Amino acid sequence: MICKKCASPMAVILRKKDHYCENCFILSTNHKFRACIGKNKVLSPNENVLICLSGGVGSAVLLDLVHHGISLENNKKLRIVPHFIHLFDDNVPEVSDAILKKCQKYNFDIYFVHLSDYLNNNTQLPEVNQIVALKEDDKIKFTRLLNCMPSTAANDYLLKVKRHLFIKYAKQLNCSAIFTAETTNTLAINLLCNLAIGRGSQVQNDVGFCDVRDEKVKILRPMKDISKEELDYYVKIKKLVSITRTNVKSNSLQSAISSFVSDLQQNFQSTISTVCKTADKIGDYEEDKASGKCVICKSALFTKDMKLSALEATNISKTVSLGNMNFQQDLENNSELLNILENNSNNSMFPLINKYLCYGCSRNHSEMSKPELLQIG
Amino acid sequence: MPVPCRRDCGKNAVLKRPKTGDALCKECFFWAFETEIHYTITKAQLFNKGDSVAIGASGGKDSTVLAYVLKTLNKRYNYGLNLLLLSIDEGITGYRDDSLETVKQNRDDYEMPLKILSYKDLYGWTMDEIVAQIGRKNNCTFCGVFRRQALDRGAAMLDVKCIATGHNADDIAETVLMNVLRGDIARLKRCTSISTGSEGTIPRVKPLKYTYEKEIVMYAHYKKLVYFSTECVFAPNAYRGHARALLKDMEKIRPSCIMDIIYSGETMSVKEQVSLPTQRICSRCKFVSSQEVCKACVLLEGLNKGLPKLGIGKSSKAKKMLEEYNSKQINNESELEVAVKDLNNVSDVTVDKSKGLCRNKKNTNKENDVDKCNKNNCCGGTCKSNAKNVDPAVSNKKLNMLLEQYGLEEQTTVNHPNNQDKEKVNGSHTPENSDDEEPAQNGDDEDDTCSSACGRLGSLQIGF
Ligand SMILES: [Zn+2]
Ligand SMILES: [Zn+2]
Ligand SMILES: [Zn+2]
Ligand SMILES: [Zn+2]
Ligand SMILES: [Zn+2]
């Protein structure tokens, strides 16, 4: 078997049919990364970019791709000024150490920020290359917050927390863009997760190339055309170190979807790219029509005019399951049924919806055992 | 320990609502279930006073519950609707007997007029005749395409204002996932709308859009409604199979995901620059089509002009006629071939993909390894998954599992002998019929599968 590009001996087989030698494969992965940034034309030369490293395979490859790009001296040089950040918690301390070592190898500085910094309004940059823990207070509060939600809500909430922190530190570092390392596979998972938790209208920002919810800082996903399969080869060929740890809580929609997608990957890689192509066609951000932003995920609060949606239907389910017998009599004698049902809003499933929270965040909120911890409304 | 009904009616709860988790007594559950549907109907303005409404009736649980609830609400809230049941008979010897019996039972129980329209009435051909004409190879293409349009044609013949189908919340959520998996952006956009139909066509509405399948099964059970259940023997296309398996897994973890997926579909928009195939009306039959001439018409033309051999005259005039005929014939044939090929493409993609992911399917398969296919059905006996009446014991097991999970009553009534007589079958997972396997909308917009009559995917399905 030989490389389909240069006829050297084959080292890589993609999608069970495309053969490449190591060299051509690495070139093509670099090309995908650069093409993704290039064709979307969102970066101006020498922009400050915050690059988010989780320690996983994706971020190991992203780090290498960026390093390679900015080391070039020809017209293909990647013209960005990279800054690096890693968000950590106390569960797996060795991840932070490994990332620090790796960055030192590439001669990059990196900031370490604890997740519980989310609760901290103070935005002071930590010292570079220092893994400093935060106040115990914040940590305890943050853990309590996460623990009062079922795993699906907690997984989702954590994503929003990370997004918030990335943007907060990007601003601090004068970055107008952020790179995150989601691959095709991750994005397919995220698309299905978004649908499953009622975030269909947020797909473009959560799954597309560019999250534009913040006016100043764009979050970009330059590895969106690279598959998990390609990553694994890349890491193997370049002998990169990565620490794989799953930070998705089990028994959640996210874990169910991600095992579904990895099953798909075994046999139907094409389905995964189909799913991602679908994602590219979804959305058209109607910022001007929005009445405000969700305080948690910063998505536009949805006010599309609909006679009836699953939101009203959910509220009615609650209302009719709780109403007392008098209420039933009222309904049966009264032709103004709709009004009665709808004005019975103290039964609303989502008291904060469209005022403070979007549908997805409201759903999470409704499942919290101590919703007051969010301090909203 | 008895749990009091959540609605403070003084009675003890008999079940936990699968949708909300609230413990309710039987009467309060009925009331909540019906009131939600009433709310959906009024809020979405599905009907107008005085409308004639055809209920697509297959004898399955969804359409049976729909018919019962519509009749109840029509009376309770004075909708002023003229309700009638509409069933389609493909004309496959022996195939519809049981389900049509059930529909007739519904007619008598609910005192609603029933119209059974056959393929012969609608298209001039029965499936048996089509099999005789076309052979066994492509007949599933026919039954799939014809079935998709049958309700529309039937409704037009009956001159009704709209068609109500039994699609439930699970069907719709599943369809959203399926359309994402197969990248069908046009259907993804349409599949969550409660009412569909373009100018000049008879709209289809889904009053059970927000109703959970599990609650439909429980409602039918506690109301002792008679329905016909086919075991899940029909093979959905692979994408639907995957979507269904995923949805079932997710529902266990977070039951609200069904509503949340529907909400996602409802609020999702498609980028403007994406061009969606426009839906239009077939120039021949005037039903919804994505092409100038709909697939049903193309197939019909092929059937109608298919085989007669012309006596060949020697005059130049006859020769000219013959040439014309031949060229027309070639056109028809190629049109037909293209259509058939087109239809089979869908199955091409999906054959083989049933492995691995579709856990539910695998089990049903085993049962289907025994060739249940009636020699006389549309597939001429080649198809593995023929809808058949099920062993009631098997289906009762399913219901029992549901009751075990959600029932709070100390003893359930399932095994009561009288009951068993009445409930022909109570399966919990029943993609029963045309109206059910087609969560997409109109005519051409459906799955190109032949699930009603034989459950095969076109002619290429190799048995799940
Ligand atoms: Zn090569
Ligand atoms: Zn939100
Ligand atoms: Zn009660
Ligand atoms: Zn068939
Ligand atoms: Zn037509």
Image (cartoon, coloured by chain):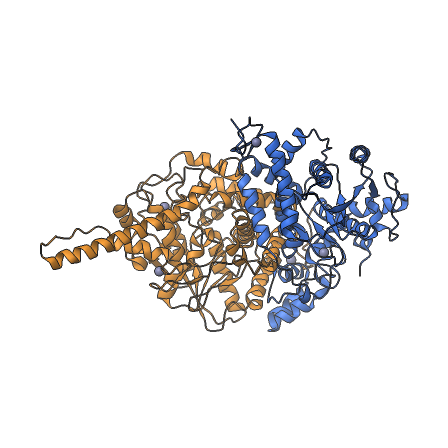
Quadrant of the rendered structure where residue A299 is?
bottom right
Res. A257 visible in picture: no
Chain ID for orange: B
User: B214 or A53: nearer the eye?
Assistant: A53
Please determine whether, in this image, residue B364 is positioned above or below residue B18.
Answer: above
Could one spot residue A336 in this view of the protein?
yes
Q: Residue furthest left?
A: B314
Using residue B27 as the reference point, say whether residue B58 is left or right of it.
left
Viewer-side residue, A135 vs A177: A177
Looking at the image, residue B429 sits to the left or right of residue A213; the answer is left
Residue at left offset 83%, top offset 41%? A112
Q: Is residue B307 left or right of residue B249?
A: left
Residue B315 placed where, x, y %? 9, 57
The x and y percentages for residue A200 are 63, 55
Which residue corresponds to the image point at 35% horizontal and 51% vertical from the top-left?
B339
Where does the image place residue A244, in percent across and percent down from the top left? 71, 33
Height in image: A328 above or below B348?
Answer: below
Q: Residue B10 falls in which quadrant of the image?
A: bottom right
Quadrant where the C terminus of chain B lies?
top left
Chain corresponding to blue in the figure: A
